[in-house]
Amino acid sequence: MDTLAAIRRPIEEDLSHYEEFVRRFFNAETEPLHSILEYVISNRGKGVRPMLVMLAAGMLSRNPQAGASHRTLLAASIVEMLHTASLIHDDVIDESNMRRGKASVNAMWQSRNAVLVGDYILAKTFANGMHSGQYDIVSHVVGAIGELCEGELMQSAHSRALDMTRDAYLDVIYKKTATLLGISSSVGALTVGASSQQVADMRRFGDCIGMAFQIKDDILDYTPDAETGKPSGNDLLEHKITLPMLCVLEECSEEERKQIIEQIRECSTEEQSVALQQMVAERGGIAAAERTMRQYIESATRILSHYPQSEYRDSLMTLCAYIGERNK
């Protein structure tokens, strides 16, 4: 059994119900919307966010054997489809033609249609939440949209100016990635009536693994044999300075820093990107970024250690380890 299968094991039946839930609500009779939605739904990723919702709910539920409630399934669909819409928009912004090893929505159906489909998914997602009457869930999640947008704008500004700092980077990835993972685990707690302290704990837990998750993604972009579905060095070609490069720049003299920044500014070919990747690896940038990632994972596991052992907690612990060890 692979690691993700082991993580999913306590919630296998819940995930099956969740898939039915998503397909029932995200469907359309008209074209091209029907075809695009089918393509999007069939090519989602690992499903970390809905897993977080269900595992947090299971760990804190008074009756976990009853399975995921309608509230938990609804919350899982809201966070996952919010994430899905953000990726569709992200590919338009970055002009990316690939997503998870397949053509992106904008590559298949043009950017203007991709934007509209992303908007449709967002509208449908929150309409489902409001029509269900679960206003506390919708209220808990909706703030993440603003955070995501702010993070994208901040990253875009720093990419143009090539003036990223560690503090700015951590702020960007908190808003772009960690916020939604934090909300995923905390809304899972909310759906089962957990205490305010437990909801807060799950928010901090999700924030920590979200930070680790994005740092690992940025490390994988410097890893030629990573199985991310995108070519390595993509961030450098987009002039994005992430933690591995920042760790090198922090140790440079001012003159050397200016030289490297200029190389990033001029980076437009695979050969230039590979040369920068090799430089970062040789100077310890990847190893230093790995250490920062591990600190976030350790913080996440410490939070879980205060809760009683259960198959749900065990899966969350395994998820922490998986985030640090994955190659895709």
Image (tube, rainbow, N blue to C red):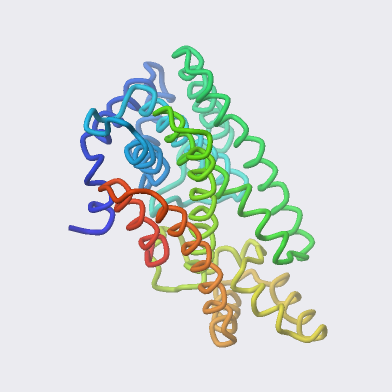
Look at the picture and state if 237 lies above or below 92: below
Look at the picture and state if 105 lies above or below 283: above
Q: Is 244 on the left or on the right of 264, as rendered?
A: left
When asked about the image quadrant of residue 23, the answer is top left
Q: Residue at x 66, y 36 (%)?
A: 146
Q: Nearer the viewer, residue 153 or 285?
A: 285
Q: Is 180 on the left or on the right of 238, as rendered?
A: left
Q: Residue at x 62, y 45 (%)?
A: 93
Task: State whether residue 203 appears in this view.
Answer: yes
Residue 311: % across, % down: 25, 48
Q: Residue at x 39, y 19 (%)?
A: 28
Tell how many labels: 0
Q: Nearer the viewer, residue 47 or 153?
A: 47
Look at the picture and state if 125 lies above or below 310: above
Give the residue at the far left of this rendering: 1
- Which quadrant: the C terminus? bottom left
- Which quadrant: the N terminus? bottom left
Residue 218: % across, % down: 54, 64
Q: Nearer the viewer, residue 192 or 144?
A: 192
Q: Is 162 on the left or on the right of 48, as rendered?
A: right
Q: Residue at x 42, y 52 (%)?
A: 306
When asked about the image quadrant of residue 246, the answer is bottom right
Task: State whether residue 83 appears in this view.
Answer: no
Residue 277: % across, % down: 56, 78
